[in-house]
Amino acid sequence: MTGDELFSKLSKFGLSPYEIKVYKTLLLNGPQTSTSIVSTAGVPQPRVYDLFNNLLNKGLIEISPGKKKIYRAVPVDIALNKIIEDMTAYKDELTEYVKVSEPEMTKYNPYLWYLDNTNLIREQMKNMVINAETEIILSLRLPLLKYLDRYILDAADRGISVILTIFPDSDRYDISELVNRVVIKRRPGISPEIMIKDRDEAIVYVDNVSARAKYALDFQEQEMIHIINYYYYNIVWKPSIYISKFQIRQKWEFKTSWISCEAINVFMNNGYKLTGRVIGETQNGEIDISGNVKGTDVIPGYKNSFLIETDERVFTVGGRLTRIEDIRLEKFQLTAEKNNTK
């Protein structure tokens, strides 16, 4: 990126082209008089004092006392941090105003959004990772993996269950940090990039090679999210090979039954005793139970359920659209302890 391109991005902070020229001149050439600035920056003489006042008000320049005025730039880190702080405060104030000013009536909210801007898609996926509360399911090619890497690690560090499928193009990328904190599989071939957050939002990123187009569909409707999750499990996850499995940590939390079953099987096969808490719904309403996890009951293409035993009985737990299990899963908290029984 050239110097001119770099400085032009100051427009994002509300600077006009002429204001950028003046600030750039003072940053690169040091303190100057107004006459020198007009000559060096190439700005119109009649406009220069208005430009100075604007930059002073924005905290980007300083002016010396005395009759002969000398202008100097405020260092970038100080000046821009002040603008960022002001913008953040304004954002919070505006957000709160909109929240309290919204009418109580239910607003129409589309269940499907079409995104055809690569940067917008990338930022939406980043925000989904940042805002996840329990679980993130992803399949990512190398460019998105590299961009989302640090956000995924941050999510894992705050206790989010991250389930990731990567593709052969990621073989040349160092995933060692991810391996230590994320459940990862590698798929032999390419498939669509997908992200599912907390079972309340899903993005399918489409790369239409024949049409030379990239776009994404953002779903916020439960039935469609269930279909996408089902597609991910059968087409993306199942043909893939484990790189890193579920590791022991204080607690795992899931919203998806097939992931719950995968974790239970991994831990049980390695000799761990499992306890859990299930929050969900039965035919009689909401339920919140804790007990010993007894195993899984998986029939490919039909059900992914597990069993949890309380003092009262053994319950079967299935996915959100389950019809045959006792409990429809909303959230599952899993704790694993090494079983010392011989």
Image (cartoon, helix red, strand yellow):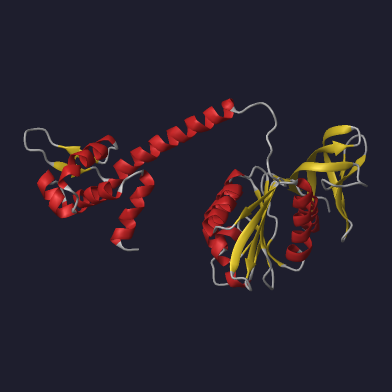
Percent across and percent down for residue 113 are 65, 50
Along the viewing direction, whichever of 69 and 309 lies nearer the viewer:
69
Along the viewing direction, whichever of 259 and 207 lies nearer the viewer:
207
Percent across and percent down for residue 259 are 76, 53
**Res 135 seen here:** yes
Along the viewing direction, whichever of 313 and 77 lies nearer the viewer:
77
The count of marks equals 0
Say whether residue 185 is left or right of residue 87.
Answer: right
Say whether residue 315 is left or right of residue 73.
Answer: right
Residue, far front: 46
Query: Image point 84% across, 54% down: which residue?
Result: 342
Query: Image point 72% across, 68% down: which residue?
Result: 240
Percent across and percent down for residue 16 are 31, 47
**Res 339 seen here:** no
Along the viewing direction, whichever of 311 and 88 lies nearer the viewer:
88
Q: Is residue 201 above or below residue 6?
A: above
Q: Quarter-wise, where is residue 288 in the image?
A: top right
Percent across and percent down for residue 246 are 70, 55
Say whether residue 84 is left or right of residue 306.
Answer: left
Say whether residue 281 is left or right of residue 214.
Answer: right
Q: Quarter-wise, where is residue 122 in the image?
A: bottom right
**Quarter in which the N terminus is drawn:** bottom left
